[in-house]
Amino acid sequence: MALAQNMPLLSRLVSSSVAIASHAGGIIRDILKKGELGIVEKENASDLQTEADRAAQRCIISSLNKCFPKITIIGEEGEEETLDTSDKVFDPDAMPAVNVKCPSELSSLAEEEIVVWVDPLDGTAEYTQGLLDHVTVLIGIAHSGKAIGGIIHQPYFNYQTPGGKLGRTVWGVVGGEVGGMPLTSPPEGKLIVTTTRSHSSSTVNDAISAVSPDEVLRVGGAGHKVMLLLEGKAHLYVFASPGCKKWDTCAPQAVLEAAGGVLTDIKGIPIPYHSTAPHRNSTGVLASAAGIPHKEFVNKIPQHVKDNLKA
Ligand code: AMP
Ligand code: MG
Ligand code: MG
């Protein structure tokens, strides 16, 4: 159904992005089913791209561009994947709209003021290895350098649950609300940390040891790890390494902060999301579920780990 043009831009953008991310999830599933992954290495062997990353980005960027032509969109797979995409456009009005409440301070933004960070497939390594519940599609919305809205789509949610509805899309607006999932607090009396499974290093492990976790969940994808915080399965996401990019953290940060959590770099400093910000989150990532004292954990990260991560 077409969205009323008098709705705030942010509400329309989030609702359309929910539909577009869900459609991109279908593209990702179809490519895996066909088995023609077309894997290429990007920076190195631990940084892969598949046809699913490329096709999902073509669909997401061309579809958002068609609906919101003046927004700046930055996609992980670069500009090549956004050329000649006229046949890849998906009309989000083909799916039911979601009702997205917009706080008054964000209700009169113009397209020119918005930057969208797109990770068309987060958890590519895990996708190629069949760890399908680690895969997410991320569309992050920023204004004045801050993450203000986010969409996390899980194309394989429930894929091992007989009779369960396949796929789920979660969205959030900072100062507004989270939709698409029930929020759960992590258990009291213990500390569960989630971190990378395929990009570990000695500083990543030093930072984890310093917060004295009872349990460490090593899983793929920034989107998936933040989902664990929202589902009450972990208290903290610790990644003391420069490998994560703005498209990995923008959407998860917005959804997490809409739910009352916090995501910063490993030093507790906000991550900037202006269109000119460096893509790399060179000072790492630290995220806390709602109700977890973020600052106390920033203070526990060893100084040598912080000094090792330079902006
Ligand atoms: P991970 O927690 O290892 O799944 O990483 C979360 C996101 O950051 C994924 O999109 C990874 O591709 C990216 N990432 C993290 N570390 C690196 C790295 N060393 N090289 C390339 N990408 C990385
Ligand atoms: Mg990613
Ligand atoms: Mg990706």
Image (cartoon, rainbow, N blue to C red):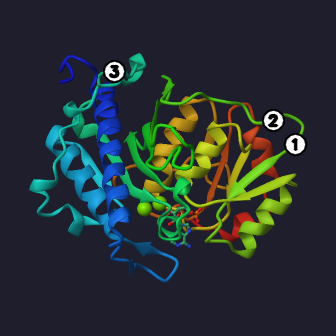
Residue 239 location in percent, x, y? Answer: 66, 60
Q: Nearer the viewer, residue 140 or 143?
A: 140
CA gap between label 3 and label 2 equals 36 Å
Q: Secondary structure at mark 1?
A: loop
In front: label 1 or label 3: 1
Seen at 53% across and 50% down, the residue is 223
CB-based contact (under 8 Å), mark 1 and mark 3: no
Q: Looking at the rendering, in which quadrant would you find the N terminus?
A: top left
| Mark 3 lies on residue | 107
Seen in the image, is 310 located left or right of residue 306?
left
View quadrant of ligand 3: bottom left
Q: What amino acid type should be assigned to the residue bearing mark 3?
A: Ser
Residue 227 location in percent, x, y? Answer: 59, 43
Q: Nearer the viewer, residue 101 or 264?
A: 101
CB-based contact (under 8 Å), mark 2 and mark 1: yes
Q: What amino acid type should be assigned to the residue bearing mark 1?
A: Lys
Residue 113 location in percent, x, y? Answer: 28, 38
219 up-or-down from 186: above or below: below
